[in-house]
């Protein structure tokens, strides 16, 4: 029963407010959910941590530790963090107790709040309590020991002051072995947190120093660095734009509030110097940065010289805007002078050239001058005197000649023939006779007479030769052959013939006569011409060696010949040529192993390489060394195992690789930004209250999360977002609570209990297995509370047992959109009356629970008292009374939902009436009767309950739709129902579709009155209470669009004089899912310059249960009891999830008071 449950939670939260800090209760219009109870940590903050103990038979249960580490009793205690205090993010508290050498550490866990108590069993009298804060300074700590205290004289309250993140408290129990047991409270006073403020720099065209930060902290001084600006001098930082007062150089410690600093600048002036070509200064001027200088003096001049005449043409460098001191130098253009050049041969003028430019080299264009020669000399033109050079004035050049002697022939004759070349010798040259000619086998007579110098005529010089004779000797001891010669004496040049007779197997390689090698004229005949010396005949013989082929293991050879000294020769073209023995040797071939054949074991853990010689078929097998590398699969790509085999053979290393594909991981679930390929792994890894999102169907009938009562599931709250998928487990258990959303969960194992402290089905289906027979247990509930909502269905088969351990009485709720199907169920429970009442409320009309004879459990009977064995559907009973529009009791506005709430208790509180955009509040209905005053509603409900405590009462908040219409304009798009510029009634749902993009462009986003509203081409919205203009914006097709969620405040409306209604609009791209859509709010005074986020908001209001099926969502929140002096700061708030994870979006800040939005 929904209303009762909310009231209990709210009452518990309010009670905790009073106990844990004395914060007064807030007006009901400001409290819509228990999670909203917060307090800002803006000054010293006192936090009380308490311990709750389980009792058994009237006494506390502790865990006692002996000095030997033995024994003990069960401690069942839980440290409780007060819910009315907001600590800094991640501020964990650690309590260390040093008790006589035993140290007990108690960690405050921000997720589960579980903490062990401690108790020392030693006879020690002193304890040190060390309390450590992760981020906050501790000013004071008080420890109240209200737990188990043994012996007298024990202090039950001790305290200490400090100024650090760690503080130690000493407790002295006095004499007599006093010991302090688990204390009841730790009261910690924290120092105020450091405040951070913004700094805005107005640079006036300058560039800020990288050392100047955008924020400062109030606990330390900040030195301000100078900015820079080209052409200007920095004049200091000022706190006003008029630069009045003194400049500031730092922000002192203890300052507060955002700061705006203005940079002051003074323009620089520079010296411009004007110089002539020779450095003479023509003038100077002072010019401001950025202006263009000009010269105002006389035109500069430069004197002429032999080569040039000069004219002024401008300045160097070119004149430009001033950026610093600059010197400009006068520049001149020049004109070249011209002269006359005369060419003469003696007294004869050969040529005259006029107008020859200065610096050019003149040329003579006439005929070459000549001079007649005689019998001894000729004359040759050699140039001009003086030497021709570049013109520097009028010039005369004279022809010059060189004297050249005439030449005559000198001829040498030997034996009547011209000897050598005929020499040509110049007249008067000294003559030197040639060297005496030498002719082998001949003697020369000498040269005839020769004159000392060459006469002026040709001359001939002569000489003669005579022939010589020599002997021929044939030795008698030449081995293996005999020699015959046709002569024994011969003159030089005579032909001598030889015949060589060899023994069998020998061949004549060569025959020599002295130093002359004889010519082979036949197989065994030779001849030579007699040299100019006596000769002895020499014969060189060779022995033939036949060819032999090589094998893999033995050398072979080609046909060759060997001398007596074992020199090696080959016969080519009838001649013997010496060579190396290696040249005739055919080396043994050896084995020619090619690439190996690889043999792998079946599991690829071993391999061998087989090498085979193709000539002789020899085989060698080498065992390889196998290594492997595993590339793990990801959710996007396959993985693989790469096996590498290496074998070394004949000094070479051979490598073979083999790859085995590992299929890529299937994304099954995520927890935050962490991914898992197993839903069980995701459940085990998630912390309590974290959401597990499923991305694939899961069929794991052998998996039983939490049933073994391990930490993985059993000891935490589980929220399972099935994301449209189906999950099948054996069974599922949690000692805390489980929420199943957006999909189907099947539990298949029969006769296994499913434990849940609380079970929530939210837009989900839960199927339990069909019973094997009517007495088989299908599912057992040990539940504090069961809630079936938002179109959910739960199917229960066979024996079902409900046990409300943690709630009295047991609570079972089905909303108006959901059902529970019971198939031949046998129902029982620890408190049967409560179980039957809670579940029986949803039976069909006339149906009831009853027992058959000799049966323990209850069955379902129809209106005729007959046992129902078919399935029975449980749902919300049909209520009377009509509502137009309404809101939930927690303040979340649902403008399209017809809402009915049922109450059966007298402690009913009238629901608030927040503003609903497009509607007027009418009042409340109680069982169909309309009331306009809240007190009247309260009185009516109390009277109905007093008359019949079990009566059903229908209360609804009633609205009437406004008839106002407003203009809707669409630019670059069309409306689904109507035309752009038409007027539509407030609250009408419309859809805008962007026009097709032109070539080269693409759709980017929609803007709503200039604010980005959506990145989807199709945008749905409700008409607000004002005119709106929607514009489709396009960008270049080459631009990568980062599609993201959008959030903005659409309107702020004053209501009833002292309330403000805020309307937030959010949108997410296609494929994304909205998790939270709402509003953040706080007063400007409370923010004190801080950014408005979930950490600094006084109110964080959002919808997290009805928004996830939409791409665009509208959320309205009404803030009650707004003071005339209040300025409220609000932002639209969005949390959504896409393929890249979870994202948080804050809209632009809007300021408002009771007059509406503040625009200045």
Image (tube, grey):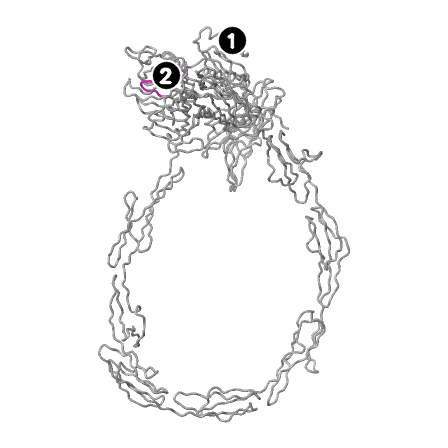
Looking at the image, is mark 1 or mark 2 earlier in the sequence?
2
Residues drawn in magenta? 795-807
Total marks placed: 2
Query: Which numbered dot is residue 939?
Result: 1
Residue ranking furthest to the bottom: 449
Predominant secondary structure, magenta span: strand
Quadrant containing the N terminus in the rendered view: top left
- Image location of residue 797, percent across then percent down: 32, 20
With respect to residue 96, does 294 lie above or below? below
Task: Identify which residue, 333 or 627, lies in the foreground.
Answer: 627
Whether residue 889 sits left or right of residue 614 in the image: it is: right
Query: Is residue 797 within the magenta segment?
Result: yes
- Image location of residue 840, percent across then percent down: 38, 13
SS for tag 1?
helix
With respect to residue 1041, does 703 lie above or below? above
Which callout, 1 or 2, points to the residue nearer the camera? 2
Quadrant containing the C terminus in the rendered view: top right
SS for tag 2?
loop
Query: Which numbered dot is residue 1154?
Result: none
- Image location of residue 1021, percent across then percent down: 52, 27
Whether residue 971 sits left or right of residue 325 in the image: it is: left
Residue 309 seen anywhere in this rendered image of the structure = yes
With respect to residue 772, does 468 lie above or below? below
Task: Identify which residue, 741 or 507, lies in the foreground.
Answer: 507
Count neighbours of disc 2 (C-alpha within 10 A) and say few if under 14, some if 14 to 19, many if 20 or more. Answer: many
Residue depicted at x 30% and y 13%: 856
Query: Is residue 741 within the magenta segment?
Result: no
Whether residue 175 sits left or right of residue 209 in the image: it is: left
Quickly name the residue at label 2: 803
- Image location of residue 484, percent across then percent down: 26, 86
């Amino acid at each position: 029963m929904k209303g009762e449950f909310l009231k209990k939670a709210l009452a518990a939260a309010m009670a905790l407010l009073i106990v844990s800090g004395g914060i007064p209760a807030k007006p009901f219009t400001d409290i819509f959910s228990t999670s909203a109870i917060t307090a800002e940590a803006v000054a010293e903050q006192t936090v009380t941590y308490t311990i709750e103990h389980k009792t058994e038979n009237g006494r506390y249960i502790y865990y006692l530790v002996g000095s030997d580490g033995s024994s003990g009793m069960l401690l069942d205690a839980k440290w409780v963090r007060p819910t009315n205090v907001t600590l800094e993010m991640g501020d964990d508290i650690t309590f260390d107790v040093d008790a006589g050498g035993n140290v007990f550490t108690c960690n405050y866990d921000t997720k589960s709040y579980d903490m062990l108590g401690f108790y020392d069993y030693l006879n020690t009298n002193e304890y040190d309590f060390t309390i450590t804060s992760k981020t906050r300074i501790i000013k004071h700590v008080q420890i109240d020991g209200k737990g188990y205290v043994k012996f007298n004289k024990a202090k039950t309250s001790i305290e200490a002051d400090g100024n650090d993140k760690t503080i130690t408290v000493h407790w002295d129990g006095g004499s007599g072995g006093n010991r302090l047991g688990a204390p009841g409270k730790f009261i910690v006073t924290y120092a105020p947190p450091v405040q951070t403020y913004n700094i805005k720099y107005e640079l006036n065209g300058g560039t800020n120093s990288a050392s100047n930060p955008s924020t400062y902290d109030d606990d330390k001084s900040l030195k301000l660095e100078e900015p820079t600006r080209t052409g200007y001098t920095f004049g200091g930082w000022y706190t006003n734009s008029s630069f009045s007062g003194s400049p500031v150089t730092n922000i002192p410690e203890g300052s507060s509030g955002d700061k705006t600093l203005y940079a002051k600048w003074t323009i620089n002036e520079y010296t411009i110097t004007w110089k002539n070509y020779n450095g003479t200064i023509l003038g100077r001027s002072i010019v401001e940065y950025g202006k263009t200088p000009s010269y105002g003096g006389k035109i500069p001049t430069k004197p002429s010289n032999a080569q040039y005449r000069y004219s002024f043409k401008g300045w160097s460098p070119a004149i430009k805007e001033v950026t610093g001191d600059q010197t400009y130098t006068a520049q001149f253009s020049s004109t070249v002078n011209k002269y006359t050049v005369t060419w003469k041969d003696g007294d004869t003028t050969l040529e005259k050239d006029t107008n020859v430019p200065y610096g050019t080299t003149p040329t003579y264009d006439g005929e070459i001058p000549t001079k007649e020669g005689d019998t001894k000399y000729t004359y040759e033109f050699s140039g001009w005197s003086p030497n021709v050079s570049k013109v520097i004035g009028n010039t005369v050049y004279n022809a010059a000649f060189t004297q050249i002697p005439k030449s005559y022939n000198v001829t040498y004759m030997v034996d009547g023939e011209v000897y050598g070349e005929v020499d040509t010798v110049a007249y008067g040259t000294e003559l030197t006779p040639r060297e005496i000619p030498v002719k082998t086998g001949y003697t020369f007579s000498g040269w005839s007479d020769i004159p000392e110098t060459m006469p002026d005529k040709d001359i001939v010089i002569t000489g003669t030769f005579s022939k010589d004779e020599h002997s021929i000797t044939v030795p008698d001891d030449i081995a293996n052959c005999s020699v015959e010669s046709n002569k024994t004496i011969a003159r030089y040049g005579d032909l001598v013939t030889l015949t060589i007779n060899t023994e069998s197997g020998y061949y004549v390689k060569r025959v020599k006569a002295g130093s002359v090698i004889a010519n082979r004229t036949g197989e065994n005949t030779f001849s030579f011409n007699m040299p100019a010396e006596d000769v002895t005949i020499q014969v060189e013989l060779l022995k033939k060696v036949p060819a032999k082929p090589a094998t893999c293991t033995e050398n072979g050879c080609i046909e060759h010949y060997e001398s007596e000294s074992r020199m090696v020769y080959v016969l080519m073209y009838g001649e013997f040529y010496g060579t190396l023995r290696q040249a005739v040797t055919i080396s043994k071939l050896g084995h020619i192993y090619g690439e190996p054949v690889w043999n792998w074991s079946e599991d690829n853990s071993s391999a061998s390489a087989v090498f085979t010689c193709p000539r002789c078929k020899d085989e060698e097998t080498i065992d390889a060394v196998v290594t492997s590398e595993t590339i793990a699969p990801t959710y996007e790509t396959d993985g693989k195992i790469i096996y590498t085999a290496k074998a070394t053979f004949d000094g070479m290393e051979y490598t073979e690789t083999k790859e085995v594909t590992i299929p890529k991981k299937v994304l099954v679930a995520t927890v935050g930004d962490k991914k898992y390929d197993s839903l069980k792994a995701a459940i085990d890894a998630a912390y309590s209250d974290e959401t597990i999102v499923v991305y694939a169907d899961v069929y794991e009938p052998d998996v039983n999360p939490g049933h073994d009562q391990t930490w993985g599931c059993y000891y935490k709250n589980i929220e399972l977002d099935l994301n449209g998928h189906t999950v099948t487990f054996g069974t599922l258990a949690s000692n805390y609570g489980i929420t199943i959303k957006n999909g189907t969960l099947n539990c298949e194992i029969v006769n296994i209990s499913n434990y849940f402290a609380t079970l929530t089905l939210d837009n989900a289906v839960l199927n339990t297995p069909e019973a094997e027979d009517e007495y088989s247990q299908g599912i057992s509930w040990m539940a504090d509370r069961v809630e079936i909502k938002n179109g959910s269905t739960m199917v229960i088969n066979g024996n079902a047992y409900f046990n409300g351990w943690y709630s009295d009485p047991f609570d079972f709720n089905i909303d108006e959109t959901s059902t529970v199907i019971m198939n031949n169920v046998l129902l029982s429970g620890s408190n049967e009356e409560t179980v039957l009442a809670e579940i029986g409320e949803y039976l069909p009309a006339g149906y009831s629970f009853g027992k058959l004879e000799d049966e323990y459990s209850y069955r379902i009977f129809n209106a005729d008292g007959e046992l129902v064995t078919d399935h029975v559907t449980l749902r919300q009973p049909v209520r009377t009374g009509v509502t137009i529009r309404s809101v939930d009791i927690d303040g979340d506005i649902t403008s399209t939902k017809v809402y009915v709430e049922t109450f059966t208790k007298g402690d009913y509180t009238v629901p608030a009436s927040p503003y609903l955009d497009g509607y007027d509040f009418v009042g409340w209905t109680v069982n169909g009767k309309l009331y306009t005053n809240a007190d009247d509603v309260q009185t009516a409900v109390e009277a109905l309950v007093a008359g019949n405590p079990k009566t059903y009462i229908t209360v609804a908040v009633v609205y009437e739709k406004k008839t106002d219409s407003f203009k809707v304009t669409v630019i670059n798009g069309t409306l689904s129902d109507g035309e752009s510029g038409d007027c539509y009634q407030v609250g009408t749902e419309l859809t805008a579709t962007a026009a097709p993009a032109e070539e080269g462009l693409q759709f980017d986003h929609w803007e709503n009155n200039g604010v980005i509203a959506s990145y989807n081409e199709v945008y749905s919205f409700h008409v607000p209470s004002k005119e709106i203009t929607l514009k489709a914006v396009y960008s270049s097709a080459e631009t990568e669009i980062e599609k993201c969620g959008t959030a903005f405040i659409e309107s702020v409306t004053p209501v009833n004089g002292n309330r403000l209604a805020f309307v937030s609009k959010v949108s997410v791209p296609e494929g994304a899912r909205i998790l939270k859509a709402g509003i953040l709010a706080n007063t400007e005074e409370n923010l004190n310059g801080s950014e408005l986020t979930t950490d600094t908001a006084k109110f964080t209001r959002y919808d997290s249960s009805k928004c996830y099926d939409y791409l665009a969502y509208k959320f309205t929140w009404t803030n009650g009891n707004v003071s005339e002096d209040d300025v409220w700061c609000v932002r639209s708030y969005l949390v959504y999830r896409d393929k890249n994870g979870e994202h948080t979006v804050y809209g632009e800040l809007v300021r408002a008071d009771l007059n509406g939005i503040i625009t200045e």
